[in-house]
Image (cartoon, rainbow, N blue to C red):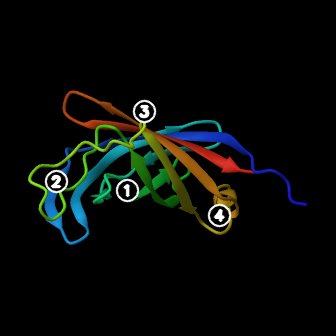
Amino acid sequence: MTDPLRAEPTFSIQVECEAAVDLGSTPYGQRRVIPIIGGHVDDEALRAEVLSGGADQQLVRADGVLELEARYLLRSDDGSLISVYNRGIVVSPNLIRTPGPGTPEPQQATDAPTRPYVRTAIQFEAPAEGPHAWLNRSIFLSTVELGAGPATINVRVQVYRVL
């Protein structure tokens, strides 16, 4: 018998983003890209800065579910570079369904929860040797909370290590 699935809070990443760039309707759904311009991790487990140049590619599917796929780099306080790949979904009552054939207006999703469901699987790629190698040896999940600043979007990614 296997152990039950458990996870422990590990650290949080504060990500600073610019406004979304809307690519419009594509064959796969409504596409937008959110540039990542900075941020930080300031925790006992990891101290690092989020480097500018990453992006969160988002797709709103026909069923109203938002798929997110973020890629960016962290530079730890010792200078090590750590690649981050975060992929997940958002189910929110604020997302609307893409109109189907013969549907004149988008419709509010009736089966959406009252609070957003935001869950992601986050993968790190750190140097194989050194103080951050532990990031290569576990499965991580995360939650994402959105906040707005005066000119940017602030995102808090709470990372959990699956035990």
State how far apart marks 2 and 4 are (Cα): 32 Å
Q: Quadrant of the N terminus?
A: bottom right
Pick the residue in front: 157 or 81.
157
Q: Residue at x 24, y 63 (%)?
A: 29
Q: Residue at x 51, y 59 (%)?
A: 82
The amino acid on which the numbered mark 3 sits, given as a three-letter code, is Arg
Crowding around mark 4 (Cα neighbors within 10 Å: few <14, some 14 to 19, many 20+) is some
State how far apart marks 1 and 4 are (Cα): 22 Å
Instruction: Tell me the tag on residue 68.
Output: 1
- 104 left or right of 77? left
- 78 left or right of 87? right
Marks 4 & 3, CB-CB < 8 Å contact: no
Task: Indicate the secondary structure of the residue bearing disc 1.
Answer: strand
Rendered position, 50 above or below 26:
above
The amino acid on which the numbered mark 1 sits, given as a three-letter code, is Leu
- In the orientation shown, which residue stands out farthest toward the left? 104
| Mark 2 or 4, nearer chain start | 2
The amino acid on which the numbered mark 2 sits, given as a three-letter code, is Val
Q: Quadrant of residue 124?
A: bottom right
The amino acid on which the numbered mark 4 sits, given as a three-letter code, is Asn
- 135 left or right of 145? right
State how far apart marks 4 and 3 are (Cα): 32 Å
Quickly name the residue at label 3.
115
Pick the residue in front: 103 or 63.
103
Q: Position of residue 45 (x, y in %)?
A: 65, 42
Q: Position of residue 21 (x, y in %)?
A: 16, 53
State how far apart marks 3 and 2 are (Cα): 25 Å
Quickly name the residue at label 4.
136
Crowding around mark 3 (Cα neighbors within 10 Å: few <14, some 14 to 19, many 20+) is few
| Mark 3 or 2, nearer chain start | 2
- 38 left or right of 14? left
| Mark 1 or 3, nearer chain start | 1
